[in-house]
């Protein structure tokens, strides 16, 4: 029996009966597991089993079965191997905590107030400042007609935003052409853990991996240094802070606070937020910009809305959610490329789902969100980009639980409002200021790391006259 699953209080999964099974595929490409499984879902149906390097996975992607898996009374969050492996970095931080770990509830209750719709008001000014840094950067590019890598710039922007809003800590991302070393260390560490979770290397073969093991230690060490610097910087500062870090530090000092977190756990939360708070939004912005740059009629309509609602000035807080069409562009981009492309669900007790699949207590399935978002409920051409899929009447006409970019239930994304406010603000700002030219021969390619990102998608921004 595998101890990693035992840690979540479960035995090894017994996949439901009568599922289409695809035997171990020799040529599993570790670079594209999500895209390959999404293609398989279209062939194999709403629920199927796949062996990946000797390990069984049950994938669910049909609207009906996913609807059932999202029933919180019968199912709960599960950490599939690729996510569980990230516990080496995130431990019992919010994202990677097991449901039964007390620090999950503590941190959730402690930080939840910092993520309400009202709390976004407090982040707005900083988000505008960071968007201004992007404008400055893109105006320089515009003067030289230089193309720029969109995912790389969006990563700078979102890392800056979570750093400054959550921790009053700047990475000075725009000061350098290069991606900040925090990002490379993070991507390296996450990828290493995920690959390692799929490929169980026997001890005798471990020396073959000595180099990547060493690189991993270095990356982990670097993440720990950034973490220490975030905390040290705060301890050395005077002034009134109200950010996530301060909420956690104040609670830790308050002996009466039932949600006080230990110093170690605060560290895991910091890393969790620095990672979860930027990588996902960066991908979402990059995909939205890809669709805007390649769909002129959508671009014009979105820009007309920005001109009408914002005019030429910097937006007030309340003007951001008024960009209804820009929001639909974002929603539709996250439909086609949900940047967190899968999440795990486990049965709380024995149950039957779909047309007679039995799941015992602890059996788990991976919801393949990319495939769910291409279910026939999305129409005859689910692969096509159409922001009007998110017109209110169309949303109402679809069943619940067919759109899940932010997960589901109690363990759904705590940063959803944050991400949406930031992304709509930034897309609006770009539409307001720049024309975008993409290489017409570019075909969307996707890099799968913890999340999905467009790969090598470049635009040349030019300042609007
Ligand atoms: Mn986020 C959980 C997607 C932005 C912080 N996030 C999740 C989950 C999904 C998700 C899906 C649930 C995963 C699971 O069930 O295993 N998150 C996104 C997407 C975006 C996003 C697609 C942007 C777009 N997330 C953000 C931002 C923050 C954040 C921004 C922080 C500022 N997310 C989290 C945290 C969790 C989470 C923390 C874990 C919540 C919990 O389990 O209590």
Image (cartoon, rainbow, N blue to C red):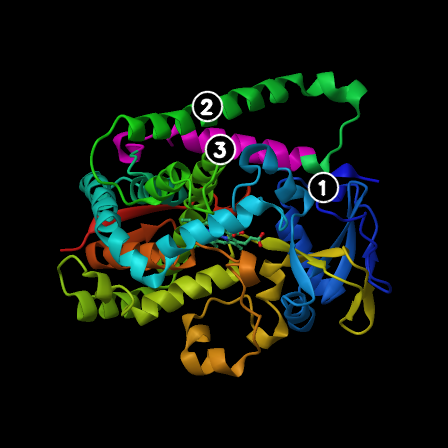
Q: Nearer the viewer, residue 418 or 154?
A: 418
Give the extent of the magenta segment: 171-196
What secondary structure is the stretch in magenta mostly built from? helix
Ligand 1 contact, mark 2 (Cβ < 8 Å): no
Quick check: marks 1 and 3 in contact, CB under 8 Å?
Answer: no
Q: Earlier in the sequence, mark 1 or mark 3?
A: 1
From this view, report whether residue 68 is shown above or below residue 273.
below
Q: What's the residue at 13%, 61% (across, down)?
A: 312
* Residue 190 magenta-highlighted: yes
Apparent side of residue 89 relative to residue 10 in the rendered image (left or right): left
Residue 149 visible: no
Q: For the residue labelled by badge 3, is the local secondary structure a helix, a strand or a loop?
A: helix
Residue under numbered circle 1: 7
Q: Earlier in the sequence, mark 2 or mark 1?
A: 1
Query: How busy is the neighbourhood of tag 2: few (under 14 within 10 Å), some, or many (20 plus)?
Result: some
Q: What's the residue at 30%, 28% (across, down)?
A: 235
Quick check: marks 2 and 1 in contact, CB under 8 Å?
Answer: no
Q: What's the residue at 53%, 67% (across, down)?
A: 403
Q: For the residue labelled by badge 2, is the local secondary structure a helix, a strand or a loop?
A: helix
Q: For the residue labelled by badge 1, is the local secondary structure a helix, a strand or a loop?
A: loop
Residue under numbered circle 3: 186
Residue under numbered circle 2: 222
- Taking the view exactly as shown, the residue that stands out farthest to the front is 256
Q: Quadrant of the N terminus?
A: top right
Q: What's the residue at 46%, 74% (across, down)?
A: 389
Label 1 and label 3: CA atoms lie apart by 25 Å
């Amino acid at each position: 029996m595998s101890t990693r699953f035992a840690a979540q209080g479960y035995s090894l999964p017994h996949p439901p009966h009568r599922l289409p099974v695809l035997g171990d595929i020799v040529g599993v490409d570790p670079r594209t597991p999500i895209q390959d499984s999404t293609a398989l879902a279209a062939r194999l149906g709403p629920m199927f089993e796949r062996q990946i390097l000797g390990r069984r996975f049950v994938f669910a992607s049909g609207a009906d079965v996913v609807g059932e898996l999202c029933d919180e009374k019968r199912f709960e969050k599960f950490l599939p191997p690729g996510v569980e492996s990230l516990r080496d970095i995130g431990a019992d931080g919010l994202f990677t905590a097991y449901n039964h770990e007390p620090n999950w509830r503590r941190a959730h209750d402690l930080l939840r107030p910092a993520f309400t719709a009202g709390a976004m008001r407090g982040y707005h000014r900083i988000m505008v400042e960071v968007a201004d840094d992007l404008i400055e950067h893109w105006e320089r590019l515009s003067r030289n007609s230089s193309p720029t890598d969109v995912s790389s710039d969006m990563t700078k922007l979102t890392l800056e935003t979570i750093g400054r809003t959550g921790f009053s800590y700047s990475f000075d991302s725009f000061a350098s052409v290069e991606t900040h070393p925090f990002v490379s260390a993070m991507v390296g560490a996450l990828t290493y853990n995920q690959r390692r979770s799929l490929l169980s290397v026997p001890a005798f073969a471990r020396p073959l991996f000595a180099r990547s093991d060493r690189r991993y230690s270095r990356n982990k060490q670097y993440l720990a240094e950034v973490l220490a610097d975030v905390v040290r910087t705060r301890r050395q500062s005077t002034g009134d802070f109200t950010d996530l870090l301060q909420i956690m530090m104040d609670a830790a000092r308050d002996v009466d606070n039932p949600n006080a977190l230990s110093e170690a756990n605060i560290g895991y939360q910091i890393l969790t937020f620095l990672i979860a708070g930027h990588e996902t939004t960066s991908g979402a912005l990059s995909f939205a910009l890809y669709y805007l740059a390649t769909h002129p009629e959508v671009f014009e309509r979105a820009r007309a809305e920005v001109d009408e609602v914002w005019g030429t000035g910097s937006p007030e807080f309340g003007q951001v959610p008024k960009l209804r069409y820009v929001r639909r562009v974002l929603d539709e981009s996250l439909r086609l490329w949900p940047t967190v492309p899968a999440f795990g669900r486990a049965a709380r007790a024995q149950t039957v789902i779909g047309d007679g699949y039995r799941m015992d207590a602890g059996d788990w399935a991976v919801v393949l969100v990319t495939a769910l978002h291409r279910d026939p409920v999305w129409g005859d051409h689910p692969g096509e980009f159409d922001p009007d899929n998110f017109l209110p009447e169309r949303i109402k006409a679809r069943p619940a639980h067919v759109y899940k970019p932010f997960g589901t239930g109690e363990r759904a994304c705590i940063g959803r409002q944050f991400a949406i406010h930031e992304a709509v603000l930034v897309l609006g700002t770009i539409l307001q200021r720049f024309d975008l030219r993409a290489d017409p021969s570019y075909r969307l390619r996707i890099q799968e790391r913890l999340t999905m990102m467009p790969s090598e998608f470049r635009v040349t921004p030019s300042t609007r006259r």
